[in-house]
Image (cartoon, helix red, strand yellow):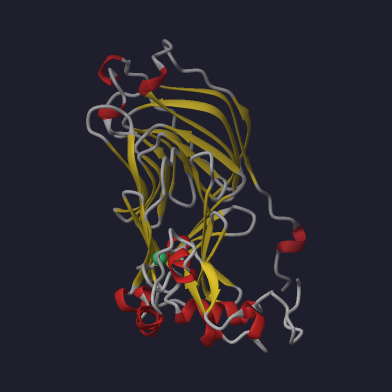
Amino acid sequence: MTHNKFGLGRKIPSEVEREVRRKSGFGCVVCGEIFCDYHHIEPYEDAKFHDPDKIILLCKLHHGEVTGSLNGRKMSDDTLSKYILSPYGLRKGNNVWRNLTSIEAIKLGNFLFLETEIALRIDGLDVLSFSFSDEEFPIVGVNALFFNSEGREILKIKDNVVMGVTDVWDFREEGNTIQVNSASHKIDLRIIFHNNGLLEIERLRLSYLNGTVEIGADGALISKYRDKVYALTQEARIRGGQVGIEIANGVMRLGKGERTQYFKGASNIAKNSQPSRLSHEDSAVLPNISQNQSPQTPPTDNWSEFSYNGTIAGQRISIQRMRHSHGSTAIETDGRSIRIGVSNGSPMSMRIEKMSINSIKKSASDKTEG
Ligand SMILES: [Zn+2]
């Protein structure tokens, strides 16, 4: 049946749905669970229109209790009314999801991180990270702290428990996706929990003290900090290491590794090979540099692996399978120059299968006329 006796369709208009979510505290009115059903307090068959005052959010468990379909247990109307008057999310200030399990990889826009402890760090704050058990490699849980475009905290994950702030314009779940908006077309966060253990941050508009980090519809990550602007477009893949993307005082570093306990036997490998440093002006063109600096092939778990194909600080960069030892950074840039393979002071070695750097020349039509 697509319509009831009053000709009312099943589909709740999206603006009514948002009003229902807001009134329910963006989660189950009883327990705050993020992933919910829409439940009509007034039976749908008797409804003349979709009234947001007569629809609430309930998780699977409590939906079962309210309808009496759960082992014969039925919640009384009085009890339900108390929850509707004071929904969990509005009472506590947050909703919650406790069933996140086995995240093994993180995707941040076009960046894929495998076995990287911290995917994104901004001015010393770990925005997105894994916690590991001390002895071996197994992942204990994923942690995150997301701010919106106004610098307000909107969602955090602590050891796989997801908590969303309920004082937002909209907080919507759909399938395996959570999306937080600060206005109709302003997506602050879109996060997808894939079945294969991949956690994907598909969209982000994050503000912090002096800057912003954005992931747009094309997956490009744009960092802005005063006059420093970095665009990480297209694809990158980072395996191992401590920090995937680090932004400190607006300067971006990629693929930093220093937590030696995750790289067994790391002290045996470094052989004093000099890091390669590349720095050039915007007008310079360095086509197809190939390097092979490794004196030996160390065990793979002593290395961070980095591949990149995109744009940083106005340079088109392509790096295929760069492997660098712990304590070093794959790429560092200050907005004008780019350094590939930066040591933190201790000996390092690295190996790059193929690399090219090309300036993006501004075409004549880009120049302002005067
Ligand atoms: Zn519930």
Q: Nearer the viewer, residue 282 or 328?
A: 328
Q: Nearer the viewer, residue 349 or 198?
A: 198
Residue 291: x and y in percent read 53, 21
Q: Which residue is painted at 70% across and 69% down in the image?
A: 368
Residue 298: x and y in percent read 39, 14
Ligand 1's quadrant is: bottom left
Residue 169 appears in the picture as rendered: no
Q: Furthest-front residue in view?
A: 72
In the image, is 6 to the left or to the right of 213? right
Q: Which residue is painted at 76% across and 73% down in the image?
A: 2
Q: Which residue is painted at 41% across and 74% down in the image?
A: 29
Relative to 202, is 317 above or below? above
Relative to 68, is 357 above or below? above
Q: Furthest-top residue in view?
A: 296
Q: Which residue is painted at 56% across and 83% down in the image?
A: 42
In the image, is 125 to the left or to the right of 174? left
Viewport quadrant of the N terminus: bottom right
Residue 106 appears in the picture as rendered: yes
Viewport quadrant of the C terminus: bottom right
Relative to 17, is 112 above or below? above
Relative to 173, is 344 above or below? above
Quadrant of residue 144 in the image? bottom left
Q: Nearer the viewer, residue 340 or 121?
A: 121
Q: Nearer the viewer, residue 349 or 171?
A: 171
